[in-house]
Amino acid sequence: QVQLVESGGGLVQAGGSLRLSCAASGRTFSRGNMGWFRQAPGKEREFVAAINWSGGSTYYADSVKGRFIISRDNAKNTVYLQMDSLKPEDTAVYYCAAKRNNLFGSSPLSYDYWGQGTQVTVSS
C-alpha cells in the first residue's frame, strides 16, 4: 500500500508560483511512476504531469508544458510540482497519484493510489 499526502496549495495571483509536494509512505514508492492530476469544478480530472521511477523521464500536458516542472526525491519519498507563470485556468484541486508499475499513463484509471488533493486558486 502507498499513502499520499499533498501540500503546498493556496491562493496566488496570475503570474505567480506555487510548489506542491506529495509525501508518500509505503515501501513501493520508489518503484513506480508518479503523476499529478487536477480537477476544476464541473470538469473531469485531467492529467498534468508524470515522472518515472528514477526521475529521468517526465511528461507534461500541453497546457502546462514550459510552466510546470515535476520532480521526485526517492530518499524523501516525495514528489514535487513546481508551478510557475500560473494562470486563472490553472485553478483546480491538484491530486498526486502513484502507479505500481513503471508504465507511463495519462489516464486517471491507470493509477493505483491517490492523495486527498490540495486546492490551488489563481486570481486574475
Image (tube, helix red, strand yellow):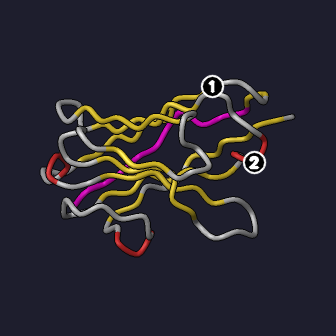
**Residues packed near mark 2 inside 10 Å, few (<14), some (14 to 19) or many (20 plus):** few
Q: Nearer the viewer, residue 1 or 71?
A: 71
**Quadrant housing the C terminus:** top right
| Magenta part of the chain | 1-11
Residue 66 percent across, percent down from the top left: 54, 34
Q: Is residue 118 above or below residue 116?
A: above
**Residues packed near mark 1 inside 10 Å, few (<14), some (14 to 19) or many (20 plus):** some
Query: Does residue 31 appear to the left or right of 41 in the view shown?
Result: left
Q: Which residue is mark 1?
A: 17
- Which of the 4 image quadrants contains residue 40? bottom right
Q: Which residue is mark 2?
A: 89
Magenta stretch containing residue 22, yes or no?
Answer: no
Q: Which numbered circle lies on residue 32? A: none
Residue shown at 20%/49% (left/top)?
29
Q: Residue type at mark 1: give it.
A: Ser
Q: Nearer the viewer, residue 83 or 96?
A: 83
Query: Does residue 15 appear to the left or right of 35 in the view shown?
Result: right
Residue 75 percent across, percent down from the top left: 17, 31
Q: Residue type at mark 2: give it.
A: Glu
- The local secondary structure at tag 1 comes to loop
Q: Is residue 108 above or below residue 122?
A: below
- Which of the 4 image quadrants contains residue 87? top right
Sequence-first disc among 2 and 1: 1
Residue shown at 20%/55% (left/top)?
32
- The local secondary structure at tag 2 comes to helix
Q: Is residue 44 above or below residue 60?
A: below
- Which of the 4 image quadrants contains residue 2? bottom left
Q: Is residue 91 above or below residue 67?
A: below
Farthest residue toward the bottom? 109
